[in-house]
Every structure is written in structure tokens, then in C-alpha cells.
Image (cartoon, rainbow, N blue to C red):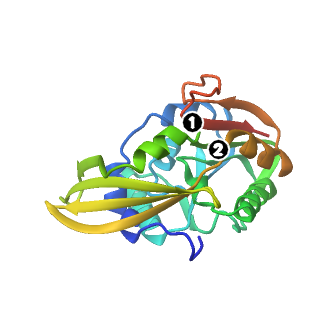
């Protein structure tokens, strides 16, 4: 999103991305919050390769996916064709997207707001969401609840965080080390990629941390009412031990 902060190109390799992100613990949550009337219009921002978009469409919902990265959208479109579902995928920036429709539900899943590094980036994205939301529509957002202990432990040594085989047959191991930057609230993460047993590269994954009261305030400033705030996808109340911040807003 900015030249000062980076996300490595290999992370946006669609097969690398899909191999690492094959979990479904958030799908039932999002399906539960889909509007009950099937003609409702749904918009997913930062849809990636369609991990959530496709099963939501397969459940009969009218969903559109938006993402910033063309390689992700190319894979998402191919998956949609393979599964026989009709989904519009649009390449756009979540801060500045401008679509002709308004939506009954807009959601930003999978910690994607952590790639909005500056306050003005977040406020622009929230303003764009509000502009596209129907009167009475819902806005859902999920992200991390920052853990100082986790960040501190992550600074000490390189640790393996993922190991898998991609769809195109690559054996991938990812090892992680991080360094938190107090002035910007950026957690600067280095992912060391080993592919087919050989070191490949170090890929950056910078993530802006949003602390709970801070994010509550930004949402309210942007004109949203927080109806629910959960700490997990099973809708446990948010508290100090929650790993997630999950907002249902109107």
C-alpha cells in the first residue's frame, strides 16, 4: 500500500498463498451473518483467491470479491469457473474503490486491515465502506487483538510457522522472526522461505497493529455503530485474552 511498508511478492504467489491458508474456522461465522434473503448483495474486500468468496457463493449468496492483487484474482476467477459459480471479481484498492452498487453486507476478513499502515489509510477504507453500504446494512471486520507477549517472543529467534505442499508440487517451509516498531505500531515480520529443501528468499510481511480501544474509536469516528464485538469466531465475548477482534457494525 505504501513504499515505506512492504509485503513480499512471494506471499502473493497464489499457490503459495493457498497452500498456507487452507483453514475454514471463519467460514461458518461469516455464513451465519449472511443476510437471510438471497437477493441481498454481498461485498468482500481483500478476497484473495476466493477462500471465503467461493463457498459463500456456493451457499446461494450474491457476492462480489474485491482485491488489490491481480495474481490473487486470476486464481479466484479460475476457481470460480472450475466450481461453476458466477462471481464478479474486481481489482481495486480498499481505500479508494468506487463501485456502482450499494451492498447489504460488506466484510473485510482475515486480518486484512493490518495492511492499512497509516491512520488516514484506515479512515479512507472505512469511508469507502460506508459509501457503499445500504441503509441498515452490516459491516463485519476481523483482525488480531495485539499481544505484546507474542511479539516479544517472536523477536527472539527464527521459528517455523508453516510447512506444506503447494498445488503445483512445491514443498514449502516458512520460518518467522519479527520486530515491533513502536513509533508506527508496525510489526515488521520477516518470513524466510525454504522451497524444495533450499533457502529461497526473505519476504517482508509488515502489519500495523490496531489496539482495541483505538479501533473502537476509529469505527465510531467513521460513523459506524458497533453492535457486537467478539473475541473469536464462536462469538465468545471480547476480553483481554481474546486472540481476535471481530466487529459487527451498522
Task: Tell me which label, 2 or 1, sits earlier in the chain.
Answer: 2
For image coordinates 39% across by 61% down, the residue present is: 190
Residue 141: which numbered mark, if any? 2
Of 87 and 230, which appears nearest the observer?
230
x, y percentage for residue 221?
Answer: 85, 50
x, y percentage for residue 248?
Answer: 71, 36
The count of marks equals 2
Q: Is residue 70 above or below residue 32?
A: below
Of 60 and 11, which appears nearest the observer?
11
The residue at the far top in this view is 236
Residue 180 visible in the snapshot: yes
Q: Secondary structure at mark 2?
A: strand
Q: Residues within 10 Å of mark 2 (few under 14, many from 20)?
A: some
Residue indicated by mark 1: 244
Which quarter of the figure has residue 5?
A: bottom right
For image coordinates 48% across by 46% down, the residue present is: 151
The residue at the far bottom in this view is 3
Q: Is residue 111 above or below residue 179?
A: above
For image coordinates 69% across by 39% down, the residue present is: 212
Residue 88: which numbered mark, if any? none
Q: Is residue 55 above or below residue 100?
A: above
Residue 59 visible in the snapshot: no
For image coordinates 62% across by 28% down, the residue present is: 240
x, y percentage for residue 42?
Answer: 65, 48
Of 74 and 246, which appears nearest the observer?
246
Q: Quadrant of the C terminus?
A: top right
Mark 2 to mark 1: distance in Å?
10 Å
Q: Quadrant of the N terminus?
A: bottom right
Amino acid at each position: 500500500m505504501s513504499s515505506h511498508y512492504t509485503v513480499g511478492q512471494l506471499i502473493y504467489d497464489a499457490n503459495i498463498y493457498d497452500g498456507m491458508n487452507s483453514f475454514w474456522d471463519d467460514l461458518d461465522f461469516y455464513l451465519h451473518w449472511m443476510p437471510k434473503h438471497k437477493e441481498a448483495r454481498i461485498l468482500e474486500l481483500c478476497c484473495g483467491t476466493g477462500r471465503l468468496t467461493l463457498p459463500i457463493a456456493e451457499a446461494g449468496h450474491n457476492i462480489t470479491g474485491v482485491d488489490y492483487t491481480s495474481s490473487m484474482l486470476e486464481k479466484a476467477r479460475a476457481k470460480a469457473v472450475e466450481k461453476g459459480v458466477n462471481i464478479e471479481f474486481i481489482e481495486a484498492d480498499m481505500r479508494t474503490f468506487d463501485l456502482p452498487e450499494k451492498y447489504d453486507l460488506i466484510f473485510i476478513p482475515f486480518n486484512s486491515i493490518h495492511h492499512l499502515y497509516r491512520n488516514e489509510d484506515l479512515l479512507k477504507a472505512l469511508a469507502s465502506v460506508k459509501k457503499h453500504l445500504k441503509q441498515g446494512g452490516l459491516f463485519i471486520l476481523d483482525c488480531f487483538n495485539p499481544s505484546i507477549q507474542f511479539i516479544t517472543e517472536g523477536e527472539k529467534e527464527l521459528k517455523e510457522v508453516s510447512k506444506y505442499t503447494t498445488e503445483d508440487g512445491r514443498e514449502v517451509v516458512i520460518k518467522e522472526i519479527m520486530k515491533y516498531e513502536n513509533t508506527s505500531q508496525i510489526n515488521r515480520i520477516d518470513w524466510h522461505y525454504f522451497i524444495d529443501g533450499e533457502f529461497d528468499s526473505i519476504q517482508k510481511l509488515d502489519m500495523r497493529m490496531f489496539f482495541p480501544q483505538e479501533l473502537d474509536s476509529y469505527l465510531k469516528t467513521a460513523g459506524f455503530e458497533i453492535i457486537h464485538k467478539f473475541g473469536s469466531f464462536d462469538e465468545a465475548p471480547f476480553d483481554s485474552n481474546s486472540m481476535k477482534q471481530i466487529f459487527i457494525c451498522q
